[in-house]
Amino acid sequence: MKAAVVTESGGPDVIEIRDVPRPRVGPKDALISVRAAAANYGDVWLRQGRAPATPPVIPGLDVAGVVESVGEDIDANVVGERVVVYGVVACGDCEFCAADEPAMCADYGAIGESRDGGQAEYLSVPAANLVSLPVAVSFRQAAALPSSFGTAHRALRNRVVVDATDDLLVVGASGGVGHAAVLLGLDAGADVYACTSSDEKAAKLFDLGVTDVVRYGEDGFAGKVRELTGGRGVDVVFDSVGGDAYPSGIASLSRGGSLVTVGATAGDADTAMLQHLFWKQLSIVGSTGYNPADIKAVVDLVAAGRIDPVVDSIVSLEAVPEVHRRLEGRDVFGKVLFEP
Ligand SMILES: NC(=O)c1ccc[n+]([C@@H]2O[C@H](COP(=O)([O-])OP(=O)(O)OC[C@H]3O[C@@H](n4cnc5c(N)ncnc54)[C@H](OP(=O)(O)O)[C@@H]3O)[C@@H](O)[C@H]2O)c1
Ligand SMILES: [Zn+2]
């Protein structure tokens, strides 16, 4: 089968599009014929050697497709089903797994990182990781969901709960997980403010329904956020960018507000902003990955027409190295999808 392979750590040129054997199907596994797979910034981290992976490895955290065959322990009736893959592979017996919280498992692994992923024609995964797709949800919509919408759902409906009384600021709002946070915030009835880097992306964010857009700027964006909120600041900041955006995010919060961090694309922050934290009685909440309940919830939201992932472009596997360059160049709005 055809697959994108990260052959070693390095630049986009270490990715080769190769013919490789179809993956092995263990007794409890299912073989998925991939119809759509998504790109994520996590693919860049993997390629750079910053993710728990040992090349050669096939990237691809997010996959939708059709069950082609199953191992001997799995009911063959699922063959032919349309599915999206829950990409977390956890230990299955720690305290968190027992509580249906595999996203918290210390042995947390993911397809497309600790094992081969879905930027390929076929993918083998434990059959327990399959989530059925209603007919109302396309393969393209489904492939856009797990890492972006699953993560944003866990962050904004579980780790912090955003509702119609809240003002929400999304930093990195034009990206995969960022636009998911925008759409889930709007679906909750919140007033959503978005931080982005260009007029073109700002226009697209207004089209999604945000109240206003701020830019990173030399002095950060907190002053502008305060101006837009009548001096009060926002109740919740969703941040996947980190770096210099983190202190601006903290300074954008109203008293008692919360910043939920899911990533650090721009690197770590130089300051914890301690005086802001205690004086304004703020909370910083970390969130990673998603549970099966999150992916089922976002599939249902798409099926109900309440959210619709934004597709930047649909390309073939040959474009994987070019897509890495675009992700690193901040030249993506929403999700890039591969159709093998
Ligand atoms: N914890 C988790 O489970 C989890 C899940 C998904 C993603 N993440 C993390 O969240 C981050 C975003 O992932 P994604 O897949 O949504 O990425 P993405 O689609 O590439 O979006 C990232 C966005 O961040 C903004 N950005 C700000 N500073 C940037 C910089 N220095 N380099 C690149 N982009 C920058 C860009 O938008 P503007 O130009 O408009 O600012 C860009 O569109 C990554 O760090 C990823 O590892 C974590
Ligand atoms: Zn576990």
Image: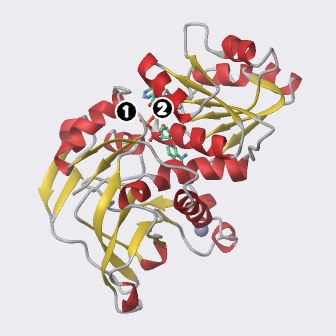
Left or right placement of residue 158 versus residue 8 in this view:
right
Q: Compared to 169, does 150 lie above or below?
A: below
Residue 104 placement (x, y as % from top left):
63, 59
Residue depicted at x 61% and y 20%: 270
Residue type at the position of mark 1: Val
Name the quadrant containing residue 21. Answer: bottom left
The residue tagged 2 is: 174
Name the quadrant containing residue 251. Answer: top right
Left or right placement of residue 201 versus residue 169 in this view:
left
The residue tagged 1 is: 332
Mark 2, Cα crowd under 10 Å, few <14 / some 14-19 / many 20+, is many
Residue type at the position of mark 2: Ser
Label 2 beta carbon less than 8 Å to ligand 1: yes
Q: Compared to 285, does 67 lie above or below?
A: below
Residue 26 placement (x, y as % from top left):
33, 82
**Quadrant location, the C terminus:** bottom left
| Secondary-structure class at tag 2 | loop
Mark 1 in CB contact with mark 2 (< 8 angstroms): yes
Label 1 beta carbon less than 8 Å to ligand 1: yes
Left or right placement of residue 141 versus residue 93 in this view:
left
Q: In the image shown, does 53 or 237 lie closer to the viewer? A: 237
